Image: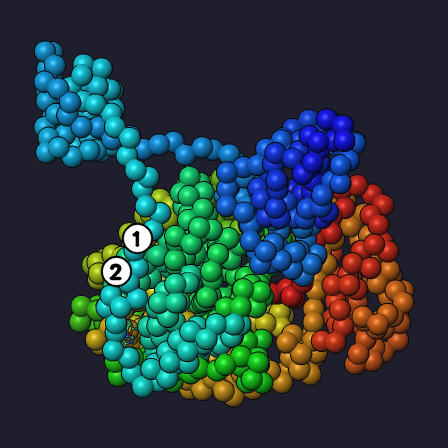
Amino acid sequence: MSGEADTREGAQIVEILLPVAVDMAYSYYAPPALRLSPGDCVEVPLATRKSFGVVWSVAPAGGAGPGNLKSVIAKYDRPPLGETLRGFVDWVARWTLAPRGMALRLATRAVEEAAPETPRVGYRLAGPPPERMTAARARVIEAAEGGLTFSKGELARAAACSNGVVDALVDAGALEAVALPPEPVAGALDPDFARAPLEAEQLAGAEALTSAVEQGGYRPFLLEGVTGAGKTEVYFEAVAAALRAGGQALVLMPEIALTAQFLERFAARFGAKPAEWHSGVSERKRARLWRGVAMGEVKVVAGARSALFLPFSNLRLIVVDEEHEAAYKQEDGVAYHARDMAVVRARLEGATIVLASATPSIETRVNAQTGRYGYLRLTARANARPMPRIEAIDMRANGPERGRWLAPRLVAEAQETIARGEQVLFFLNRRGYAPLTLCRSCGHRFRCENCDAWLVEHRFRRALVCHHCGHVERRPHICPECEAEDSLTACGPGVERLAEEAAILFPEARTLVLSSDFPGGQERLRRELAEIAAGAFDIVIGTQLVAKGHNFPFLTLVGVVDADSGLGSGDPRAAERTFQLLNQVTGRAGRGDKPGRALIQSWQADHPVIRAILSGEAEAFYAQETRLRERAGLPPFGRLAALIVSAKDAGAAETHARALARAGHSLPSTDRYRVAPAGGLPEADEIVVLGPAEAPISLIRGRYRFRLLVKAPKSADLQAYLRAMLAAAPKERGGVRVAVDVDPQSF
Ligand code: ADP
Ligand code: ZN
């Protein structure tokens, strides 16, 4: 054997997936010293750069040299991606038709940058005070007394001076710097820290969940319970079971704004907070959490949908709270639905999954009713609290005068509520001041220059804003069209306008307006939410940001300002969405000691959705919606995908959309799917392509959009069909984009 062959002993050919918009893994040569295994994180050359990558498969090089393969540069010091997570990445990519590299990116983004941990440094007193003393130096020395070790920032803050003063004291030998152990990434959780007494229905639910977690294996459940039923306490018992079994648990939440209260409740039950995972967590912290999760040190993560891609090593439980929320659907990049993919991950991990909601999606409810999921129900509020009493205000007969939005009855009841020292929530799901601005003299309407959308006036910002692309312009004083002065009129209400009305009607009340435009970021938002819970406001005016999940004990009256606003969109999910939202927002009332009420202002008070909300009878509503879906062959009875074809040039977009539709119709049937011939009536087991038609918003950010809907029976392999369709109609012009959305949430 030659010396050269010896040094090749143990060399490998590895397939490496890179976190870029490419589906395939690339082959690299791995020199013997590396000894790579699937899941290892590596650094590889890519064109003229270096890239992060993950080993997807490994084969011995069999004595061959690198040939024309490039060599892996190094193996990173990161825990490897486990087999189930790699399988999950493959699965998500296959399901969504996203390039596998983009799905990988969801899993590795937190650790792709090789930022080394900077060791934490603390300071403590070391020697005699320096000869030259100043007031600031004296304060720092005083702060550092007691033998404890403080960070530079802590010392500087305590002494109200700059970091430079601390540095100077170190130079003078009065303080010394010492290395501190790394901050723990998560507190220790005790499954028995403070067990809550559960009521009968809660107990039954908790027992079903704990025994599923104890047994292990994939076990899906729907936990359906009215608002305030105490679902959280029930799934906390499942978390406790996962902890006792030495495993990990993941709790997904639709809005990060929700998590503050949740973290407190969690800490009260388990003695420490869970690890938080969302875009508001610093990059460095995320990198450390990622490792902690992979090493099994972090036991429970509460997070936004991206937490689903964390490298859990022993995941026993996933909870998807408010599982019906549209926020679980990621719209751009990898268009995945976190609730559905959570079920997939649970299956791959062999874990229990709990989908919790007061108003489950039709999909999940059907799965529970057909026995695919365990069905746990809580039919009453915990602690014998009554459900809120809900009444409608018929706006046709009892609405306010022109230019006002709050009906006299709602105003009167709000006044009484505030006088009793209780809280009122006015809910209006519209940001800004007014959704449309027009000129009274020429009829000119302000629309976005990039989008097919009206500009929304934001009076506090003195601007007109596009809610689709973020375009902002100043609100002029004269009409840009006819140059009339003082002719511009705001049409319709937004939360800011409602605040103006409330200021007139309730001049004494402490009022807070909350929407996603709220300045000051997550931290300030969390503080305000805590203030509401503490009773610091009489009136809260808010969008869906305040409608969901929060526990405001002083809130006893909810006024829904425009209950019908979501109903007219023509979207088949509109009724379901409105039902869920109204249920959520009315459910905020009466969660404390006093009973709650809700008044719903509606122009169509006899609409089935409004009737279902008033009666509290969800069954009939669900039954009807489910029937409609079944008859139309829509999910969960059929499968659906939307293809959005967009381009700067409307003609190019439409031409390609037509080509795609033609390609779809002309595909031959295979054993994976059957295709309806163009023009003919489709059979029940055939796939049909509908459209193209202009997308519901036909222009966004300067791109014209056309939409195709692909409707398939459950038996069809929709993804295989979509792949064939996309391959059969290659893009002929640059600049045309096709976005595939499997299981679109609005259509
Ligand atoms: P949901 O998530 O179902 O809307 P929560 O879990 O937020 O309801 O619970 C509503 C309120 O009821 C919370 O304040 C919670 O602490 C309280 N609660 C839950 N279970 C019980 C119980 N068994 N006894 C007393 N209070 C309870
Ligand atoms: Zn726009």
Circle 2 is placed at which residue position? 271
Disc marking residue 666:
none
The 10 Å Cα crowd at callout 1, few under 14, some 14 to 19, many 20 or more, is some
Q: Furthest-front residue in view? A: 1
**C-alpha gap between disc 2 and disc 1:** 8 Å
Q: Is the residue marked by circle 2 packed among few (<14), some (14-19), or many (20+) residues within 10 Å?
A: some
Q: At 37% across and 84% down in the image, what residue appears?
A: 204
Q: Amino acid at mark 2?
A: Gly
Number of residue marks: 2
Q: Is residue 677 left or right of residue 518?
A: right
Image quarter of the C terminus = bottom right
Residue type beneath disc 1: Gly
Let me know if residue 354 appears in the view.
yes
For ligand 1, give the image quadrant. bottom left
Q: Where is residue 61 drawn, in percent x and y?
A: 74, 40
The answer to whether marks 2 and 1 mark residues whose Cβ atoms lie closer than 8 Å is: yes
The correct choice, above or below, for 504 with respect to 399 in the image is above
Q: Quick one: SS at disc 1?
A: loop
Identify the residue at image location x=26%, y=68%: 192
Q: Which residue is rendered at x = 39% and y = 63% of the image?
A: 246
Q: Is residue 614 left or right of residue 341?
A: left
Residue that badge 1 annotates = 187
Q: Whole-percent x and y of residue 62?
A: 75, 40
> Residue 502, relative to residue 578: is it above or below?
above
* Closest to the observer, 733 or 698: 733
The local secondary structure at tag 2 comes to loop
Residue 331: image quadrant is bottom right
Q: Disc 2 beta carbon < 8 A from ligand 1?
A: no
